[in-house]
Image: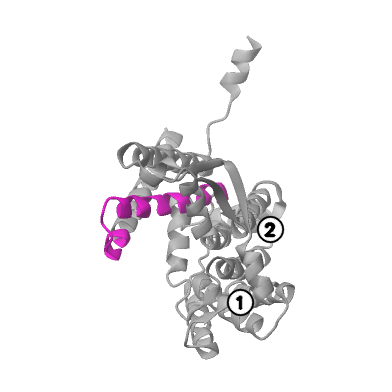
């Protein structure tokens, strides 16, 4: 009887948990469908690891953007900031710079943008879209000033570091010649997963994280609860800037080069990953775990398109747009039904 009473008292999933669960289920259904219908690389664990290797920087940027969006804001400069960080660090390392100092340089650039954006949005109350759009143009312009031509990292110690990978033999596969190819994970993936865990802890257990939900859900109610709305919103942009700086460094570790067009469109992919993961543009609802699986879902659908023989780049854009529309519609239907049931 006590067990039954416990089951009856079990609370239903809130909006954030429900949307996150839907995203995770859809990802696994999508990937399993690819395994059954297309086979090939989808059968190997390395496919998942390659998705993580290629998108580690996107995952980090999406974590920062999720924080901002939960707080009811938006930051469309993250891709341009990432690009500026990459070019700045490449040029610094090529002049004989120190690896640790280059990481501080990356975080410093991201922090500078976060501080400026946060101040203008929170304390001067300028629209975040306009502020971050200006930041996007400024970062793109500064990247071009630093170098118009692509720059490859010539720093020996850094190249040795980026060449190191975590190898997992038992998840590898046999090549056609019988050689065992171990699964390989780049160091940037470790940084990305670490960021996901830290942001999850922040949003779930730390007061600042809960305040993000409060101001995104209802700013007036947050003020009545004694939350410093301006400072909380300011901190969301500071964290987004820091994570953009780190993402730039991870991006450089993956590519080993800098280009004026680096990370072009990353901000749109980050927004799409957050929305697919269950984060609402209106704020107050979202989860970084959902964003993580949103990024994987976005990457999976692109790989499915390529594996299907549609190699032209516009097919990936079309499927991404269709997937985004599907998730927005799904969110509207699910939340609409829940609100209707709550009223009745």
The reply to whether residue 126 is in sight is: no
In the figure, is residue 157 to the left or right of 267?
A: right
Give the residue at mark 1: 113
The reply to whether residue 63 is in sight is: yes
Which quarter shows the C terminus?
Answer: top left
Look at the numbered disc 2 and give the secondary structure of its residue: loop
Q: How far apart are marks 2 and 1 (CA)?
A: 24 Å
Q: Where is residue 294 in the image (x, y as percent from the top left)?
A: 46, 50
- Image height of 148 relative to 55, above or below: below
Look at the numbered disc 1 and give the secondary structure of its residue: helix
The numbered dot on residue 227 is 2
- Image height of 148 relative to 60, above or below: below
User: Which residue is at 62% across, 78% downward?
Assistant: 89
Depth order, front residue of 330/182: 182
Which quarter shows the N terminus?
Answer: top right
In the figure, is residue 8 to the left or right of 343?
A: right
Q: Position of residue 61 (x, y in %)?
A: 55, 63
């Amino acid at each position: 009887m006590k067990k039954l009473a416990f089951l009856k008292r079990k609370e239903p999933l809130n909006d954030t948990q429900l949307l996150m669960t839907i995203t995770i289920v859809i990802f696994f259904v999508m990937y399993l469908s690819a395994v059954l219908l297309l086979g090939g690389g989808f059968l190997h664990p390395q496919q998942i690891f390659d998705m993580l290797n290629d998108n580690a920087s996107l995952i980090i940027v999406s974590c920062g953007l999720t924080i901002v969006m939960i707080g009811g804001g938006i930051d469309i400069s993250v891709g341009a900031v990432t690009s500026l960080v990459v070019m700045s660090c490449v040029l610094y390392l090529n002049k004989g710079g120190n690896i640790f100092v280059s990481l501080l340089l990356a975080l410093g650039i991201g922090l500078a943008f976060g501080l400026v954006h946060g101040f203008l949005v929170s304390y001067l109350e300028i629209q975040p879209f306009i502020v971050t759009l200006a930041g996007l143009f400024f970062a793109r312009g500064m990247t071009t000033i630093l170098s118009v031509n692509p720059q490859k990292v010539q720093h020996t110690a850094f190249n040795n570091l980026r060449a190191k990978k975590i190898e997992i033999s038992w998840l590898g596969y046999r090549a056609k010649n019988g050689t065992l190819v171990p699964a390989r994970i780049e160091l940037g993936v470790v940084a990305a997963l670490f960021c996901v865990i830290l942001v999850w802890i922040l949003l779930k257990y730390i007061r600042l994280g809960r305040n993000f939900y409060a101001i995104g859900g209802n700013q007036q109610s947050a003020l009545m609860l004694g939350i410093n709305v301006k400072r909380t919103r300011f901190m969301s942009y500071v964290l987004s800037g820091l994570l953009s700086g780190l993402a730039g460094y991870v991006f450089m570790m993956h590519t080993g080069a800098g280009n004026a067009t680096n990370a072009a469109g990353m901000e749109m992919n980050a927004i799409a990953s957050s929305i697919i993961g269950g984060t609402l543009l209106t704020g107050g609802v979202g989860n970084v775990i959902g964003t993580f699986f949103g990024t994987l879902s976005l990457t999976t659908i692109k790989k499915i398109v390529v594996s299907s023989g549609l190699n032209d780049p516009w097919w990936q854009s079309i499927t991404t747009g269709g997937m985004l529309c599907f998730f927005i519609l799904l969110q509207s239907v699910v939340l609409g039904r829940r609100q209707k049931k709550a009223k009745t």
